[in-house]
C-alpha cells in the first residue's frame, strides 16, 4: 500500500481529531512550559467555536488518518498560525515545514502581506526552525502574571 500524504482544509466534523492531534503533539511540553500551554485545554467544542468564528485549520493526513494540523486566523493584515501540531510518530519527515508552507500559500492566496506566529522562549528548537524558514522576531511578551517575557512573536513578510 502506498503512503499518501494530503493537506486539506478542516471541516467542523474534524474538530475531535484536531483536538486529539493537538493534545498528543503538545504532550511533550507538559511540565516544561511555564505557564502551561493553553493547548492542553483545547476541546472539540473549542475548535468548533474557533472554526465558526472565522479561524481555519489545515490538516495533514496520511492514508486518511490525521497526523498533523495548524490553526490560522487573520491578524493585523497577516495570517497568524498557532497550534502547529505533528504527532510524534510523524516527526522528522518535514511535515511541520509542509504545514507552514501551506499557511504561507494560504496567506498569499488571500492577498495578505505576511505570516505571524508566537513561540515560547523556552522552545529554542522551534525558534531555530522558524528562523530557518525566514521568520524574524518582532516583539516579546509576558503571559498574564509574569513580569518577564515568556514568548516571542515572529513574522515573515511575503
Image (cartoon, grey):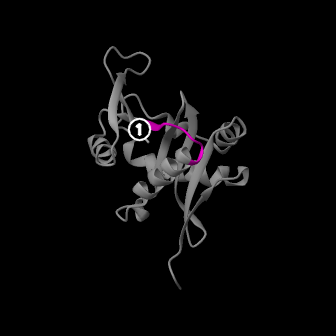
Number of numbered markers: 1
Which residue shows up at 33% across the image and 14% down it?
Answer: 147
In the depicted structure, whether residue 131 falls above or below residue 139: below
Highlighted range, magenta: 109-117
**148 to the left or right of 106:** left
Relative horizontal placement of residue 21, taking residue 44 as reference (left or right):
left
Residue 116 highlighted magenta (yes or no): yes
Above or below for 82 versus 16: above
Q: Name the residue under label 1.
A: 157
Which quarter of the picture shows residue 71? Answer: top right
* Residue 104 horizontal/vertical position (percent): 48, 48
Q: Position of residue 9 (x, y in %)?
A: 63, 54
Please name whichever residue, 91 or 44, is drawn nearer the observer in this view of the structure. Answer: 91
Based on the displayed image, in which of its 4 quarters is residue 127 positioned?
top left
* Residue situated furthest bottom in the rendering: 1
Specify whether 36 is left or right of 65.
left
Helix, strand or loop status at disc 1: strand
Q: Residue at x 61, y 59 (%)?
A: 8
Left or right of residue 150: residue 112: right
**Quadrant of the drawing holding the C terminus:** top left
Q: Where is residue 117 in the image (x, y as percent from the top left)?
A: 43, 36
Image coordinates for residue 152, horizontal then vertical, percent: 35, 30
Q: Which residue is drawn at 70% across and 37% down?
A: 49
Classed neighbour count for the residue bearing mark 1: other residues with Cα under 10 Å, few (<14), some (14–19), many (≥20): few
Q: In this view, does 104 lie above or below 144?
A: below
Q: Residue at x 44, y 18 (%)?
A: 144
**Residue 20 magenta:** no
Amino acid at each position: 500500500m502506498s503512503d499518501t500524504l494530503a493537506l486539506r482544509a478542516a471541516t467542523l466534523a474534524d474538530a475531535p481529531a484536531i483536538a486529539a492531534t493537538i493534545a498528543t503533539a503538545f504532550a511533550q511540553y507538559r511540565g516544561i512550559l511555564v505557564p502551561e500551554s493553553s493547548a492542553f485545554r483545547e476541546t472539540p467544542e473549542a475548535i468548533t467555536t474557533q472554526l465558526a468564528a472565522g479561524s481555519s485549520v489545515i490538516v495533514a493526513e496520511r492514508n486518511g488518518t490525521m497526523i498533523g494540523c495548524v490553526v490560522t486566523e487573520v491578524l493585523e493584515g497577516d495570517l497568524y498560525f498557532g497550534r502547529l501540531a505533528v504527532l510524534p510518530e510523524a516527526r522528522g519527515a518535514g511535515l511541520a515545514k509542509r504545514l507552514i508552507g501551506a499557511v504561507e500559500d494560504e496567506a498569499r492566496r488571500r492577498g495578505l502581506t505576511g505570516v505571524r506566529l508566537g513561540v515560547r522562549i523556552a522552545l529554542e528548537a522551534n525558534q531555530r526552525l522558524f528562523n530557518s524558514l525566514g521568520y524574524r522576531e518582532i516583539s516579546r511578551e509576558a503571559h498574564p502574571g509574569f513580569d518577564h517575557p515568556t514568548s516571542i512573536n515572529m513574522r515573515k513578510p511575503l
